[in-house]
Image (cartoon, rainbow, N blue to C red):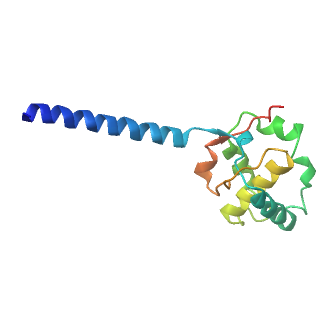
Amino acid sequence: MTARVLGSVATGVAGVVLVSALAVSASAQAPKSITAGVYTQAQADRGKETFSKNCLDCHEADRFPGPAFMAAWNGKALSSLWDKVNSMPEDNPGSLKPQEYADVIAFFLNIGQFPAGAAELPGDAAAMKGYWVEPVKK
C-alpha cells in the first residue's frame, strides 16, 4: 500500500472512532425522565429517614406528591428541585451531604408514585440536569 492509501485508511478509522465516541457521549448525556426509574427503593427509604430527622419540623411529607408537585416541577430539569432542596433547612442551608439531598429527592419521587429503578439518583448538581420531571403515564 502507498502512503496515500494508508493515510486515507487511518483518517477513515479515526473518523469512525470519533463518531462512535460522540454517539456514546451524547447517549450518556441524554436527559432521562423520572418516570424511567431513576432512584432505588433503598435510597428512597434513606431519604425518608433523612427527611424525618431534618425536614419534618417545618414540612409535612404529604405536600410533595401529587398535583402540587407536578404544578411546581413538571417539564423542568430535576436540577430545579435539587436547587430548592439544597437551600434547606432554612436555618442551615446546604448542611446535609449531597447524597442525602439526592436521597430526599428519591423519597419525594417515591411518595409521588414515580417508579423505582436499579440505580441510585446521584448526589451531584450537574447530574440532576440530566433528569426531567413529567407525569407517570397511566
Residue 89 appears in the picture as rendered: no
Side of 2 relative to 119 (left or right): left
At 68% from the left and 66% from the top, the residue drawn is 97
Query: Residue 129's spot in the image, x, y percent?
Result: 62, 44
Nearer to me, 94 or 11: 11
At 82% from the left and 50% from the top, the residue drawn is 110
Residue sitting at the far front: 1
At 77% from the left and 61% from the top, the residue drawn is 42
At 74% from the left and 40% from the top, the residue drawn is 35
**Quadrant hosting residue 101:** bottom right
Residue 70 appears in the picture as rendered: yes
Side of 34 relative to 7 (left or right): right
Is 46 above or below relative to 136? below
Q: Quarter of the image containing the C terminus?
A: top right
Query: Residue 57's spot in the image, x, y percent?
Result: 91, 63
Side of 116 relative to 24 (left or right): right
